[in-house]
Amino acid sequence: MNRDIRLDLLKALGVFCIILAHCNPPQLIFQLRNFDVPLMVIISGTLFYHSFTRKPLSYGTYLKKRVLRLVPPVWIFLTFFFVSAYGIYHFAGQHFPFTVRQVVGSFLLLSGIGYVWIIKVFILVAAVSPAIYQLRKRLPNNTHFLGILAGIYLLYELSLLTLTKYLIAIPWLSVVINNYLMYAIVYGCLAGLGMALHTLNKRERLMIAILCLGIFVAFSFNSFITLGHFIPTQGFKYPPRLYYLSYALGISTFLYNFVDKLLILFKQKTVVDSIVFVSANSMWIYLWHILALHYWAKMFPNAYFLLTFLVVTVTAVALTWIQILAQKKLTRQI
């Protein structure tokens, strides 16, 4: 498979939208970009489908390869982040701002410092993607496949409505189900959608986008009539519910459908190379933005969000570029 720059563009858009969300933008902008994580998962589903079709691996081999690609870099970054922060705050005569619970939670990819939960999502998606892929290959067409995904999602929603009152009495089971199982199911369905979208024609993808956005508008209108104001979808993200997903899937599918139109704006080789760089190194750009955002917010807590976004993004990309150059130089020396 030749590199599909359209997927690179969508992946770059997704990671920049996630960074933007952390820069304290106004509520309207925060809402508009609230499709980023589902978009990234959908793209990962498409990429997985192409990769697994070209080079099938055993489940154990694939999962080990994927976990090693995700977890060690995060732990290396977190070690550097916390150790350097301890030194910086100690040198500045200030109290170390992170609790033991935050540090441990970050390494376990739970709440922690509040940014690394997305890595947990991609590990869970990796765990279920081979099974979804096999389901996709065994079914005669996309209608059957998408119908089964919709059925799984419906059971997921019903489980959220019915299980909560029973899980309160069993805290550890509640943690496992709410923080792992539910995320694996819903984001697995999104990855499955990504495995199918590239085989649908534009009209079919547009119909999915319209259906999802129609559901979102219906929910929004109902909340406005009953409560007198718009309810942001962010409140229905952990774990994802239909209101959040209807908006995110509508926008993501719409972008997936018309990304070739966006690509017309990025024809220069330098721009294309930059998009590919961001896409290929999206995880490290995301990780470095945590460090950049932390210290920028400490120094300039009231900075305008666009300035914060620009500084944090440029710093994260620059640190990633420096890291890659250093790794190449070290490799040549070895």
Image (tube, rainbow, N blue to C red):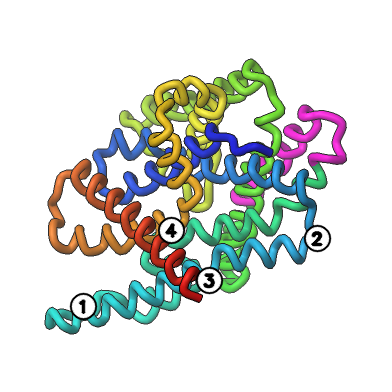
Where does label 3 land, which residue? Answer: 72
Q: Is residue 106 above or below residue 147?
A: below
Q: First in sequence: mark 2 or mark 3?
A: 2
Residue 284 shows which numbered tag?
4
Which callout, 1 or 4, points to the residue nearer the camera? 4
Q: First in sequence: mark 1 or mark 3?
A: 3
Where does label 1 land, which residue? Answer: 88
Spatial distance from mark 4 to mark 3, Cα to Cα?
Answer: 12 Å
Spatial distance from mark 1 to mark 2, Cα to Cα?
Answer: 45 Å
The residue shown at (44%, 78%) is: 104
Where does label 2 land, which residue? Answer: 58
In the displayed structure, does residue 184 sit left or right of residue 327? right
Spatial distance from mark 2 to mark 3, Cα to Cα?
Answer: 21 Å
Instruction: Write down the region rendered in magenta.
Output: 136-161
Spatial distance from mark 1 to mark 3, Cα to Cα?
Answer: 24 Å
Spatial distance from mark 1 to mark 4, Cα to Cα?
Answer: 22 Å
Q: Secondary structure at mark 3?
A: helix
The residue shown at (49%, 41%) is: 11
Percent x, y of residue 105: 45, 73
Amino acid under disc 4: Trp
